[in-house]
């Protein structure tokens, strides 16, 4: 097994045009291969900005990111092939069926022919969507849309999977199905970078957690180690609230 | 690459065919526009080109002037001649009423004794000119020596129509005066020559010093007259092709609002592939629109009693120009979709700009009736380049070489819009 980190972030900073403050301030961290890396933080902490830079959506203002040993600013084409993204918003065509959506996204990841057909059928079956595969996505429930949204990001068996709140707004059953299959995917070799507001889910799902706020990483360790290092903390949520303050965040 | 492009085309095709309302607008709207605008404009074009201006004629003269004017009006393409109203011979009163009711645009009433008055007037002139003894040149000195022709005008009649009719009347009166003058001279000279066989013949009747031949500057064998169909079918087809900018822009905006664009931007697929799928599908839509609209002109409009569309001789020319127009239209749609930030913004930006470009481009009214300053602005509209090309093909019967400049302009417009869209897309991503 390759012991080198799959993601290396060094002094990453991002300031948006016309902004007076950095959205991400001098972040440095590594993500090991096969990790389920949780990036947790309140609203406006810099999670989505960090994730977007890692996906290659926009470049950092300064600092460097190596993914699978390749510089994100130089080797974006390679990196795009090995990563999968499951955005927080449902990124699907509502007037296409589930199968048609997956067929299109599969082709965009370079899959085709029988291989693509097999993978679509496999994941639809796994996530209990075979019967609904020929229905328009607009007719789907929230949980079904989330599951299709997930399949669209994992169809090409990415080395790294970015999940931006993949279970937000879904019922317990759908959440359970999603988490179970994500764990299976991780066992099969996919490194997962995950953001969420659901502390209990993160505690059970992640192998490593980084808590981020105001664009800076405050701490990072395994959930168990984080809980035990904070006296009186019963769970990850307690740790999170101690570090990020209890006041509600509007942004 | 090809497999990605085909997948992109398939996706766009499915999105388009499932948008029934959008499709209906794309195909029904231009058809309705062609029907309505052609029917509306047909009257105006017909008035000038086919049926002529409706004229009621009252001939109380029953002599040379009256008959000559009647013959002239009957043979004049500019006029639609009538001498009866509701099956009864027209009179001054009934003609006045009919013109007032809008049944005719112009009424012409030749008074009784008009020819006699001209004859008297001419004889008097000759007498004064050559001082012939009044005994020799007998003329009736009683009565009036001038004729007053009544011209009844519908207030809605265009000034140009009235001028054209009065000009024709002047021509007829001048002709009859010359004729009478010539006859009077001939008669007098004949009286002076003892040998009657040497006298002047009625040469005037046989003579026609200047002849006119109408030649249309068209390369087709048959003359294609500009009419409502020849203008409206290509004009509204071009409008419809450019109107696809709105659904195309909507498709781009929907990708933004539904979040698909987020996923697409993180995928190993180029801008060219993602946009290429849209371009191919919408160019095909434009071509289908063109075929449909041409079919309307060829088969459906004649069923309504309208003229049949004449396509000219160059099918290659039509193909090249239509493809160039389709590319220009889709390129414009991509540009609007890229520049707009919301669906509403795109719809407003798209529809208003197309309405403006079409008005400037001569879609609503032909450019030749625009003032000079507007005509120079009109030449900047891509819809005008396309319309000019179709005019060359459909009306002048020109070939490929004649439309190459127009097609090239449209192609350059397509390249320019796509380049700007690509740059705008990159700039928008730089956050």
Image (cartoon, coloured by chain):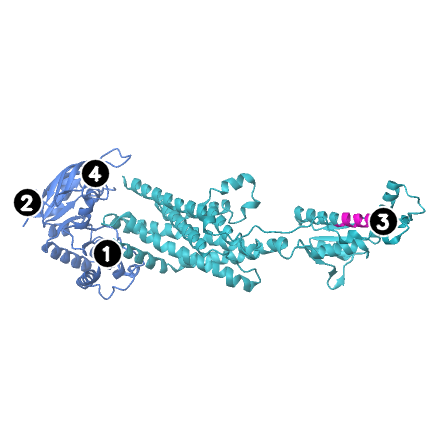
Are labels 1 and 2 assigned to the same chain? yes
Label 1 vs label 2, nearer the camera: 1
Label 4 vs label 1, nearer the camera: 1
* Cα–Cα gap, marks 3 and 4: 104 Å
- The residue that disc 3 covers is B184
- The residue that disc 1 covers is A107
- Chain identifier matching the cyan colour in the rendered picture: B
| 4 or 2: tag closer to the N-terminus | 4
Name the chain letter of the residue that bears numbered label 2: A
Residue A242 x, y percent position in the rendering: 13, 41
Label 3 vs label 4, nearer the camera: 3
The residue sitting at 73% across, 51% down in the picture is B208
Asked whether the residues under the numbered discs 3 and 4 touch, taking CB atoms below 8 Å apart as contact, a structural biologist would say no
Asked whether the residues under the numbered discs 2 and 3 touch, taking CB atoms below 8 Å apart as contact, a structural biologist would say no
Are labels 2 and 3 assigned to the same chain? no
The residue range painted magenta reads B172-186
């Amino acid at each position: 097994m390759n012991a080198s980190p799959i993601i290396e972030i060094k002094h990453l900073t991002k300031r948006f045009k016309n902004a007076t403050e950095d959205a991400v301030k001098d972040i440095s961290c590594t993500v090991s291969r096969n990790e389920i890396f949780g990036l947790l933080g309140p609203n406006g902490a810099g999670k989505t900005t960090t994730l977007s830079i890692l996906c290659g959506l926009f470049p950092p203002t300064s600092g460097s990111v190596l993914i699978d040993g390749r510089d994100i600013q130089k080797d974006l084409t390679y990196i795009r092939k090995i990563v999968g993204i499951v955005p927080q918003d449902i990124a699907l065509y509502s007037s296409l069926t589930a199968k048609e959506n997956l067929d299109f996204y599969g082709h965009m990841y370079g899959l085709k022919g029988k291989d693509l057909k097999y993978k679509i059928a496999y994941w639809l079956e796994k996530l209990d969507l075979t019967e609904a595969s020929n229905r328009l996505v607009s007719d789907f429930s929230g949980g079904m849309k989330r599951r299709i949204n997930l399949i669209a990001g994992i169809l090409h068996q990415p080395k790294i999977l970015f999940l931006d709140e993949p279970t937000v707004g879904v019922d317990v059953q759908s959440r359970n199905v999603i988490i179970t299959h994500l764990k299976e995917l991780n066992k099969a070799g996919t490194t997962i970078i995950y953001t969420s507001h659901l502390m209990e889910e993160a505690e059970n799902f992640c192998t490593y957690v980084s808590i981020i706020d105001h664009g800076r990483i405050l701490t990072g360790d395994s959930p168990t180690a984080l809980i035990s290092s904070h006296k009186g903390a019963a769970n990850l949520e307690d740790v999170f609230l101690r570090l990020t303050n209890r006041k509600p965040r509007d942004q | 690459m090809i497999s990605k492009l085909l997948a992109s085309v398939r996706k766009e095709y499915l999105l388009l065919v499932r948008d029934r309302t959008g499709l209906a607008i794309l195909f029904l709207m231009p058809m309705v526009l062609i029907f309505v605008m052609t029917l509306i404009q047909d009257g105006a074009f017909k008035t000038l080109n086919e049926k002529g201006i409706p004229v009621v004629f009252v001939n109380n003269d029953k002599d040379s002037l009256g008959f000559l004017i009647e013959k002239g009006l009957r043979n004049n393409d500019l006029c639609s001649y009538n001498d009866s109203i509701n099956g009864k011979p027209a009179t001054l009163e009934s003609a006045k009423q009919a013109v007032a009711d809008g049944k005719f645009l112009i009424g012409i009433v030749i008074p009784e004794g008009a020819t006699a008055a001209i004859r008297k007037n001419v004889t008097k002139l000759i007498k004064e000119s050559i001082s012939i003894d009044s005994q020799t040149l007998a003329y009736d000195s009683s009565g009036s020596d001038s004729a007053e022709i009544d011209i009844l005008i519908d207030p809605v009649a265009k000034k140009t129509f009235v001028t054209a009719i009065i000009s024709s009347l002047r021509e007829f009166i001048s002709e009859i005066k010359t004729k009478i003058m010539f006859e009077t001279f001939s008669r007098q000279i004949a009286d002076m020559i003892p040998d009657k066989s040497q006298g002047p013949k009625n040469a005037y009747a046989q003579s026609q010093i200047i002849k006119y031949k109408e030649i249309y500057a068209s390369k087709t064998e048959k003359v294609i007259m500009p009419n409502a169909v020849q203008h409206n079918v290509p004009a509204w087809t071009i409008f419809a092709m450019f109107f696809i900018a709105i659904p195309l822009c909507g498709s781009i905006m929907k990708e933004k609002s539904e979040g698909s664009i987020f996923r697409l931007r993180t995928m190993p697929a180029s801008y060219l592939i993602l946009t290429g799928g849209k371009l191919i599908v919408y160019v095909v839509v434009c071509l289908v629109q063109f075929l449909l609209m041409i079919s309307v002109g060829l088969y459906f409009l004649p069923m309504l009693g309208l003229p049949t569309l004449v396509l000219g001789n160059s099918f290659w020319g039509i193909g090249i120009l239509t493809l160039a127009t389709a590319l220009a239209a889709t390129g414009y749609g991509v540009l609007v979709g890229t520049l707009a930030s919301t669906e509403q913004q795109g719809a407003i930006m798209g529809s208003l700009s197309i309405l403006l470009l079409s008005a400037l481009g001569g879609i609503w009214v032909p450019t030749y009736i625009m003032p000079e300053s507007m005509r120079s602005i009109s030449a900047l509209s891509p819809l005008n380049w396309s319309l000019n090309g179709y005019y060359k093909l459909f009306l002048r019967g020109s070939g490929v070489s004649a439309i190459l400049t127009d097609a090239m302009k449209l192609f350059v417009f397509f390249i320019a819009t796509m380049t700007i869209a690509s740059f705008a897309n990159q700039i928008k991503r730089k956050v």
